[in-house]
Amino acid sequence: MSVVSTSEPDEGFLASEHITGLLERLRREPTLRAWVLTAPTGALATLGVVLDDNELVQLLEKIEELDERALPVTAADIMTPDPLTLTPETSVHEAAQILSDHRISGAPVVGDDGCIVGIVSEYDLIARTGSTVRDVMTRDVVTVPDNATLDRVRAILVTQRLKRVPVTAESRLVGLISRADMVRELAYRWQCKRCGNLVRARRPPNGCPRCGASNMFEEAPPLPAVAACPTCGKPLDR
């Protein structure tokens, strides 16, 4: 286990190879980033990082900055990268164990080429019969490209009544977006009261990057209701 510890405040520790590597990993893994921000001491200890109070504050500030960016963001910005996957040959018993052990309600199924060929949910496992994932998986999978806007992802989750949607790049699975990921995005939206600039951040930014106003951010207004199918444009039943 690699441990980082110093007795005096030193901003130079942020430039150490171990910390820069950790920040890069957190940038790519929003779920891990959220865990560190929620329970920093325990999470960082698990990751092999021990800091004094001053260093911890500095590191948390850097981690929070990873979430600050102008809207809109894309599917790639909020997805969980490299999600847990199954293969068509995985046994139904093993698939059930994996979903249970990881406390997830479903997982993508990928072939040898990394392309998604199906998805297995709790419903599939209890409603269908078969010995392998290939026998019970849902083959007609709705996916989104990694450059899809969050409005499109949100519309697909709503109109298709999905709990999760796989994210692809060049036909290969690269991530997964759940309803919980979208709910987190709603909590991360702030709007400048002076110029209307929308920003994605864990907390209200101190200054607006567009107009320079200080302490002028408030909760962003609610998103409009999803009123039509994002694919065909057909209005949704109310």
Image (tube, rainbow, N blue to C red):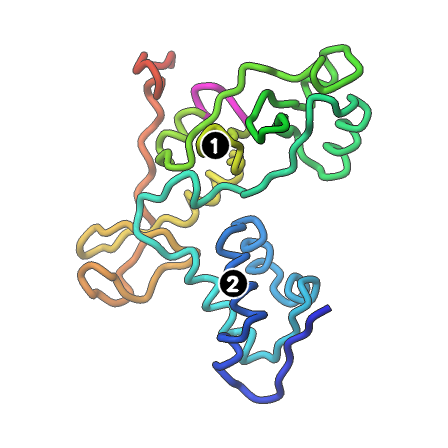
Q: Which residue is mark 1?
A: 168
Residue 181 rendering spot, x and y as whole percentages: 50, 40
Magenta segment includes 154: no
Residue 161 magenta-highlighted: yes
Q: What is the C-alpha distance between the residues marked 2 and 1?
A: 24 Å
Q: Which mark is residue 98?
A: none
Q: Is residue 199 left or right of residue 139?
A: left
Disc 2 vs disc 1: which is toward the camera? 1
Quarter assignment of residue 222? top left
Q: Position of residue 16 (x, y in %)?
A: 54, 75
Highlighted magenta segment, given as a residue range: 157-163
Disc 2 crowd rating (10 Å Cα; few below 14, some 14-19, many 20+) is some
Give the residue at the far front of this rendering: 113
The residue at the point 76 percent across, 10 percent down is 129
Q: Quadrant of the N terminus?
A: bottom right
Residue displayed at 39% across by 55% down: 201
Q: Is label 1 in a helix, a strand or a loop?
A: strand
The image quarter in which residue 163 lies: top right
Counting from the top left corner in percent of width and height, residue 230 is at 34, 21
Q: Which residue is mark 2?
A: 23
- Vertical placement of 195 versus 206: above or below? above
